[in-house]
Amino acid sequence: MDRAEQKRVIEAVLFLTEEPLKAEKIALVLATSLDEAEALMKDLKEDLAAAGRGIQVFETATGFQMGTSPELAPYLERAFSEDVSSNLSAAALEALAIIAYKQPVTRIEIESIRGVRSEHVLENLLKRKLIKINGRKEGPGRPLLYGTTADFLKYFGLRELAELPPLEAGTEAEAETEIETKTETAPTSTDPEAVEEPTVGGS
């Protein structure tokens, strides 16, 4: 397999991979050295950038990943304005705020704060990949524990949970307000690295 074919393989693998791909994985796929795998991915990155393609390769802290060129964000927002990134309901924002500030948290704990049943809200947030199940709580029934995801950070334009605004009064109602404010001011890009980074995703 020549170098051009190797880069085609890498491009296809990156396209189908949702999470950042480590050079070790590419080295295994191509049966080559780690240094050669890294060089090939960097070459592919430079090739796509030089060609001005809409899809680019970006190097992150955890590997390489395909994503869209940052300057295309306005067009992508227009194309997918009614997709998963559409506005959240007040109930979803309320539950999400509770999870963000109190995670890991159980459904019963969320419902005790909200005062209403929350199964459907949690199902919706799970489908949107804004929350995930973080195991089970020790105790009777071992209820599921919920926490936020990397997509939650992307949605609200955050790099890490530490960037969430503090709750001076310590109330979940204020948490909801703060989260909603973040929604209104978040960048259109879904990437936590803000506007200078891509909207990432596989096929």
Image (cartoon, helix red, strand yellow):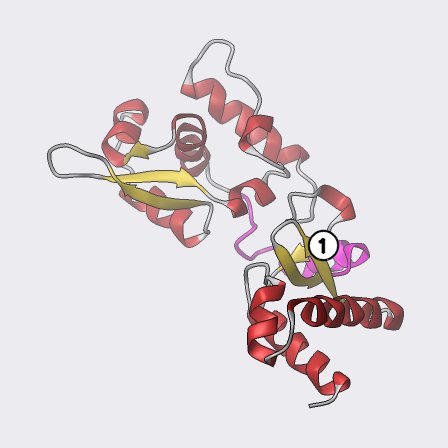
Q: Report whether 169 appears left or right of 124.
A: right
Q: Is residue 77 visible?
A: no
Image position of 126 with respect to 156: above or below: below
Location of residue 155 by image quarter: top right
Name the element at disc 1: loop
Stretch of the chain drawn in magenta: 68-87
Image position of 77 with respect to 56: above or below: above
Q: Report whether 166 appears left or right of 159.
A: left
Q: Nearer the viewer, residue 155 or 158?
A: 158
Q: Nearer the viewer, residue 185 or 81?
A: 185
Which residue: 74% across, 89% down? 2
**Quadrant into which the C terminus falls:** bottom right
In magenta segment, residue 71: yes
Location of residue 68 by image quarter: bottom right
Q: How many marks?
A: 1
x, y percent for residue 102: 39, 26
x, y percent for residue 41: 72, 69
In magenta segment, residue 191: no
Q: Nearer the viewer, residue 77 or 148?
A: 148
Which residue: 69% across, 49% down? 189
Which residue: 51% across, 10% down? 168
Q: Name which residue type carries label 1.
A: Pro
Q: Is residue 149 visible?
A: yes
Circle 1: is it few (<14), some (14-19), or many (20+) Cα within 10 Å?
Answer: many
Image position of 174 with respect to 14: above or below: above
Q: Which residue is mark 1?
A: 198
x, y percent for residue 96: 43, 35
Location of residue 67 by image quarter: bottom right
Which residue: 39% across, 49% down? 126
**Quadrant into which the N terminus falls:** bottom right
